Amino acid sequence: MAKNIVRGYYDESYPPIPTGVTRFWRRNLIWQAWRFIVLNLKIMRIIVGGHS
Amino acid sequence: MGALQNCLLRMEKGDKLRFLIGTGHPTATCQGAAFEYALNVAYEIKSRGLLHMAEITWISNEYELDDFGMGGAFIKRGGYVTPTKVFSESIFAEYGIRWIKRAGVSKIEEGVAHYETLDGQMHTQPFDFAMLIPAFAGVGLKAFDKVGEDITAKLFAPSGFMKVDADYSGKAFEDWSVDDWPSVYQNPAFANIFATGIAFAPPHQISKPIKSPNGTLITPAPPRTGMPSGVIGKIVALNIVDQIITGRTVFKHKASMGKMGAACVVSAGFNLLKGNAATMTVFPIVPDWQKFPEWGRDLNYTMGEAGLAGHWIKLFLHYMFIHKAKGYPFWWLLPE
């Protein structure tokens, strides 16, 4: 009889897993180059307002 | 050969190994560093095609993943306001890492870690390779006044960190406020002594203190990451300069962790074209539930994103930090 393999009932069964499309955009050089600029600007925003 | 390299060789030869990474004390902090380590170990194992030979377990004193000693965070993503624990669990599941949370490690023996969970149960976790962060403590400095009297307790908290302009009255969790946190990092007993970065004694945790039925406090201590530490050091230096030049004793430069943000980049794989990292910003570091009653922080300045760009940012910041630290040309242009 085939085993009943169930994906569930463990903590690690329930979090969202990135799809292939998400993984693609995470490594797409052109898109990530744009995100590099945007994220650096977001970080600068935090740094500039870091202290009075 | 390093222990990790040794493990990789053993797995290539067919041994199934258990990795245990996380916090090695019920009140340890710096979960972020251990988290990064776990992800990079998993990445290296996976890149060698050995993930099926490894059982990687994260063990932490956090109540939920992504607490990181700062009570976790909420970010706007995909049309929802989501607790960051969802993203931590997601990346762990993606990397094949299982987790044990609400755990206070009490003892380590050869190949086995003993820990207690918040429900008061005692457990053991065997391992072939472990990396566990110890608890933060001061360096154990002693202080004496001019007549030789021991004034250590006047200068330092029992943890060994130096007391500064924070509220050390020992308030209940329900009464905590961002105003408890210091802003000029000056010792109250001696006006010419300051403690910056990791050296100052925090007024209390950021995460809620929770004890097991056995009385064990299993809660992360507050983190003091690099960026706010650098900012604190800078404003203290500026205040000292101002005091020397003008004689002013009321400082104009302030940097409370309840009023400043932090940026963190958690590496999740080292490779210029296939690497990964999670870039996070939080504002403020210590949640201000008075100013931001819904989520504790400003969601316009609190964000998180995973991708190759994060890895490039981490690499960029690494070289910029060294450039600044070594005083290379135009170092003064680089912010903290």
Image: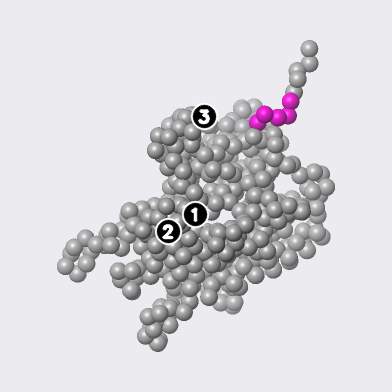
Can residue A2 be seen here? yes
Q: What sort of colour scheme is used for the picture?
A: one colour
Disc assigned to residue B206? 1
- Around disc 3, counting alpha carbons within 10 Å, would you say few (fewer than 14), some (14 to 19), or many (20 or more)? some
Chain label for disc 1: B
What residue do we see at 57% from left, 75% from top?
B331
- Which residue corresponds to mark 3? B126
Q: In the image, B141: left or right of B229?
A: left
Q: Quadrant of the C terminus of chain B?
A: bottom right
Tell me where residue A48 sits by quadrant.
bottom right
Q: Quadrant of the N terminus of chain B?
A: top right
Q: Amino acid at mark 1?
A: Ile
Q: Nearer the viewer, residue B67 or B31?
A: B67
Asked if marks 2 and 1 touch (Cβ < 8 Å), the reply is yes
- Which residue corresponds to mark 2? B202
Residue B134: percent from the left, percent from the top?
44, 46
- Around disc 2, counting alpha carbons within 10 Å, would you say few (fewer than 14), some (14 to 19), or many (20 or more)? many
Q: Amino acid at mark 3?
A: Pro
First in residue order: circle 3 vs circle 2: 3
Residue B47: percent from the left, percent from the top?
70, 41
Nearest-to-viewer mark from 3 and 2: 2
Q: Nearer the viewer, residue B61 or B48?
A: B61
Secondary structure found at label 2 = loop
Residue B22: percent from the left, percent from the top?
53, 42
Chain label for disc 2: B
Secondary structure found at label 1 = loop
Question: Which range is magenta?
Answer: A6-10
First in residue order: circle 3 vs circle 1: 3
Residue B298: percent from the left, percent from the top?
63, 63
Disc assigned to residue B174? none
Secondary structure found at label 3 = strand
